[in-house]
Image (cartoon, grey):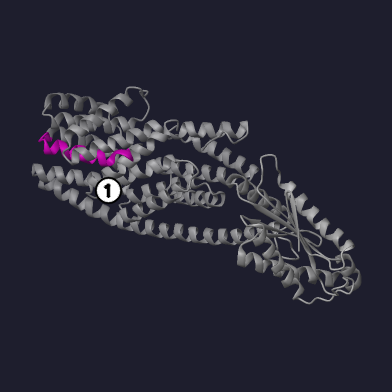
């Protein structure tokens, strides 16, 4: 999580958590607890989701309680859905996928990865979790015997990682991509390509501290020895293996490297290094049992079965087969639990989506209320200004004409005085309906300017086209036959329409058009004092004025 958007106190907590997450330590749980308290004070769903996600992450990789892990991951999903933090939601589903993968639920894992990727794709900027998911998908496809498909995902991950060089997990993720690439190329017998990727790994590892990324270094050691054996350098391979077996420890990092352990042990058997394979199995056996992780123990059990079958130790083979059957039954039970959890997550998504739909509808209604005039349903003055500014910019950019009309109800004060304000409101509503018909048919923007005045916008139209449409509006208002004794000589409600139609020039402003339209409206009012038959439409276009 980026700490820059927060105050100094909160940012310091986030930075501390980010720094400690790479090396799982129970102390980080206290920091996360403080961070949640701070998130509650700030009423910050994104921060709350971040803290619950990383608590679930730490609990999972330190095997501190499976039920608590799932509870915290669900809470993280809920808060992050509320906040719209799609990158972190991608991380939630990636972790759920890792859990499903480690339980042998490859179909559920794949579904989680795809869901996580969809969330990551919604993030404002390219997300590191997208790279992580592609890397993990490669691991999944290689595990189920599809190395070519695994390579496609690794290539996507490598391309995506190029935009993440400043991310605090960049080195770890890049190493994961490259190490997975070496493994896949070895499976495909692309030895030269595997060797080139291994050289890149060695270069990165030289810049990493002695106590950093132990599981990555362990995997690199396995692959380095496999490459030596592939090239026929058995002496050097045995030498490096002897050093490795003196220092090997896998309890904390076993999630990350169990597949590599399996591949490596089988490779030793395939190269007939039975003594070395047996010694490594004996060293790792108590460490892997201590993890009590079914998927990990099952994979290692397969390694032991492979070894004892090759060397012909039937007694040990039978023991391992019995152990394997017990682990498979245990895994089936855990898989059922994983399926139930996946249903819970789907239900949560559906529930949150329903809540968001309600909120979205409410927000749309509020936005509509904020944009429209409550009485007439037309756009209000605020929206009018925004739309007019946009229309003005389009006309100026394209060098096309912009027509702005101010429509005024004649003698409306007298109408209110004679028939009352309720009747005045009904009059405004009926005229607005006629304008809405124009908007729907011709897609002209219409708004209530204020009081008894309305604004109509004409884009890219000639004077003749505008006057024809204005006359149509005039006739439609007259056809309503609303009585108005104070509007002589018509005795009906009529309107006056002042229009400015011109191409915006560099020094023009929007208000120049409104001012000209208002002046045209004034021309109509003045002409009524001078002519027996009053005009109702006046269009101004420098230097000419047209009266109708």
Q: Where is residue 220, by image quadrant? A: top left
Secondary structure, magenta segment, majority class: helix
Horizontal side of 28 relative to 463 (left or right) equals left
* Position above or below: 176 against 343: above
Q: How many marks?
A: 1
**Position in image of residue 11 (x %, y %):** 58, 33
Horizontal side of 203 relative to 190 (left or right) equals right
Q: Where is residue 539, by image quadrant? A: bottom right
Is residue 23 something one can see in this rendering? no
* Span shown in magenta: 254-274
10 Å neighbourhood of mark 1: few (<14), some, or many (≥20)?
A: some
Q: Where is residue 131, by image quadrant? A: top left
Q: Is residue 263 magenta?
A: yes
Q: Is residue 491 magenta?
A: no
Task: Identify residue for label 1.
Answer: 141
Q: Residue at x 35, y 44 (%)?
A: 134
User: Which one is in front, 536 or 530?
Assistant: 530
**Position in image of residue 389 (x %, y %):** 67, 48
**Position in image of residue 509 (x %, y %):** 71, 44
Is residue 263 something one can see in this rendering? yes
Horizontal side of 98 relative to 303 (left or right) equals right
Q: Secondary structure at mark 1?
A: helix
Q: Residue at x 10, y 47 (%)?
A: 314
* Position above or below: 464 against 187: below
**Position in image of residue 293 (x %, y %):** 33, 46
Q: In what quadrant of the picture does the C terminus appear?
A: bottom right
């Amino acid at each position: 999580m980026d700490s820059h958007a927060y105050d100094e106190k909160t940012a310091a907590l986030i930075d501390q958590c980010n720094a400690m997450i790479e090396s799982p330590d129970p102390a980080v749980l206290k920091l996360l607890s403080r961070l949640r308290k701070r998130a509650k004070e700030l009423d910050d769903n994104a921060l709350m989701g971040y803290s619950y996600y990383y608590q679930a992450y730490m609990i999972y990789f330190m095997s501190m309680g499976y039920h608590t892990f799932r509870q915290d991951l669900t809470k993280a999903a809920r808060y992050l859905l509320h906040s719209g933090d799609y990158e972190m939601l991608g991380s939630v589903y990636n972790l759920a996928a890792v859990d499903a993968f480690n339980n042998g639920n490859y179909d559920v894992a794949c579904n989680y990865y795809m869901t996580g990727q969809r969330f990551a794709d919604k993030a404002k900027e390219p997300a590191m979790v997208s790279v992580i998911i592609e890397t993990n998908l490669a691991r999944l496809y290689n595990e189920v015997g599809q190395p070519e498909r695994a390579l496609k995902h690794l290539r996507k991950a490598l391309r995506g990682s190029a935009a993440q060089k400043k991310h605090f997990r960049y080195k770890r993720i890049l190493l994961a991509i490259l190490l997975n690439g070496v493994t896949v190329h070895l499976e495909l017998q692309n030895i030269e390509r595997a060797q080139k990727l291994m050289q890149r790994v060695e270069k990165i590892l030289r810049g990493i501290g002695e106590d950093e990324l132990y599981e990555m270094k362990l995997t690199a050691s396995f692959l380095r020895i496999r490459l030596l054996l592939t090239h026929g350098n058995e002496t050097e391979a045995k030498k490096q293996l002897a050093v490795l077996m003196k220092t090997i420890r896998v309890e904390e990092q076993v999630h990350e490297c169990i597949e590599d352990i399996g591949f490596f042990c089988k490779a030793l058997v395939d190269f007939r290094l039975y003594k070395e394979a047996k010694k490594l199995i004996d060293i790792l056996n108590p460490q892997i049992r201590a993890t009590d992780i079914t998927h990990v123990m099952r994979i290692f059990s397969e390694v032991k079965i492979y070894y004892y079958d090759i060397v012909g130790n039937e007694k040990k083979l039978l023991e391992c087969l019995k152990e394997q059957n017990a682990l498979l039954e245990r895994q089936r039970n855990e898989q059922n639990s994983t399926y139930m959890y996946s249903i819970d997550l789907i239900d949560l998504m559906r529930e949150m989506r329903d809540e968001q739909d309600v909120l979205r509808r409410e927000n749309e209604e509020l936005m509509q209320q904020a944009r429209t005039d409550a009485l007439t349903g037309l756009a209000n003055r605020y929206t009018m200004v925004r739309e007019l500014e946009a229309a003005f910019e389009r006309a100026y950019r394209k060098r096309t004409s912009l027509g702005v009309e101010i429509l005024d109800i004649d003698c409306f004060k007298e109408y209110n005085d004679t028939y009352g304000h309720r009747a005045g409101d009904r009059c405004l509503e009926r005229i607005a309906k006629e304008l809405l018909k124009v908007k729907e048919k011709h897609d002209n923007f219409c708004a209530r300017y204020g009081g008894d005045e309305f604004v109509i916008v004409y884009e890219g139209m000639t004077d003749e086209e505008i006057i024809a449409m204005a006359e149509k509006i005039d006739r439609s208002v007259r056809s309503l036959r609303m009585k108005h004794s104070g509007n002589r000589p018509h005795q009906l409600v009529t309107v006056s329409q002042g229009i400015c139609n011109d191409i915006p020039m560099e020094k023009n402003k929007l208000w120049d058009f409104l001012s000209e339209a208002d002046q045209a409206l004034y021309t109509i009012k003045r002409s009524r004092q001078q002519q027996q038959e009053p005009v109702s439409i006046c269009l101004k276009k420098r230097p000419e004025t047209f009266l109708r």
